Amino acid sequence: MTNHLPGPFSLVPFVSVDDMMKLVLDIGIERMLCDLAEAIETDFMRWEAFDKTPRVAAHSEKGVIELMPTSDGQAYGFKYVNGHPGNTRSGRQTVTAFGVLADVETGYPLMLTEMTLLTALRTAATSAMAARHLMPRGARTMAMIGNGAQSEFQCLAFKAVCGIDRVQLFDTDPRATEKAMRNLAGKGLELIACTSAEEAVQGAEIITTCTADKQFATILTDNMVGSGVHINAIGGDCPGKTELHRDILLRSDIFVEFPEQTRIEGEIQQLDPDHPVTELWQVIAGRAAGRTSDRQITLFDSVGFATEDFSALRYVRGQLEKRPFFTNLDLLADPDDPRDLFGMVMRRQSQTPAA
């Protein structure tokens, strides 16, 4: 039976993992990445309309569990997400997530959805959207360092949004590179498997780092980064976790989502608290410069921010109106008299046949 979006006092649409896969395939992955990039960029342009706060994080030795909330005054969204690098050793995902979109006026949820897949898509879309404003003109080659669960999404987003056609891949685990090469075969990219990070960055105008280990790491050393490149650093996303040598940061013009969060979690946690950075929304809105010269090193120090999830939730909710890949959940108590919740329970008891 065809699903229909429920009314505001009825059931809540739930997008399962299977539903999300159907949605992605029905839209087309590259089309969806472009659509998400547009939705995220649109919301960055109205940045000042959003409530903004660093995510609420519970850290442990094994990983982190976070809540990422925001609102534009009309809708409210939040994402629950974890990051546990050691999970892969037991066959689990490093990152899992789910999210909720709600109506501010009533407080009622409008949608519940998986966001493990959706986070990978919105992260890739954000990376490519930012790079479109910051990368060298005519860039065609990207180094993809870290070939885990997000790598294919990143590569396809940069192809669809930025026009790259060559990817040089490296991971410390050759099986991860083999996996990425296999998944990306036939997707319109020239794929080069590299045996070191140094080899991967040779000739690349864009360098994406996306590694999982929760530690201070040096994936890129200063001598590996020449002038004129754009660095998309997305692996460093919590306190104590970085990927770039500090000297690279000192040579780069750094762009961030929300400084109050990035100074805690991003690459710039290595720098002085007052080190200058540019907020990405200002570039998108035309209030600040992005790339200004051919020799400039631009660095997008991305840790992910709640407005990006809000944009993704808003986009998916809109798609459900024409692509009914969801299940209606009986999530909301709806008594005949809103003051008589107890009576609703008692009436249910009277309707239950005796054993």
Image (spheres, rainbow, N blue to C red):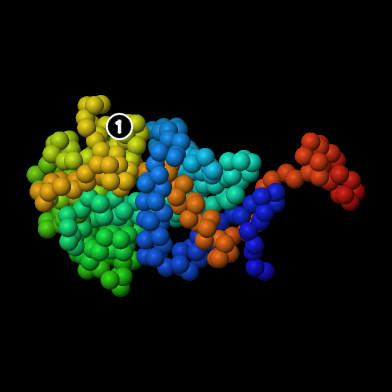
Q: Mark 1: which secondary structure?
A: helix
Position of residue 225 measured from the top left corner of the image (x, y, whole percent): 12, 47
Read off the residue under disc 1: 263
Q: Nearer the viewer, residue 185 or 333?
A: 333
Residue drawn at the location 36% of the way across and 51% of the way down: 41
Residue drawn at the location 30% of the way across and 61% of the way down: 161
Residue drawn at the location 18% of the way across and 48% of the way down: 291
- Is 157 above or below relative to 332? below
Question: Callout 1 environment at 10 Å: few (<14), some (14 to 19), or many (20+)?
Answer: many
Q: Nearer the viewer, residue 210 or 61?
A: 210
Q: In this view, does 212 lie to the left or right of 341?
A: left
Position of residue 73 measured from the top left corner of the image (x, y, whole percent): 52, 40
Q: Nearer the viewer, residue 247 or 128?
A: 128
Q: In this view, does 308 lie to the left or right of 14?
A: left
- Is 14 above or below relative to 29? above
* Most distant residue in the bottom direction: 186
Image quarter (top left, top right, bottom left or bottom right) of the N terminus: bottom right
Q: Quadrant of residue 62?
A: top left
Q: What residue type is labelled 1?
A: Arg
Q: In which quarter of the image is residue 140?
A: bottom left
Position of residue 63 measured from the top left corner of the image (x, y, whole percent): 40, 37
Residue drawn at the location 55% of the way across and 65% of the way down: 323
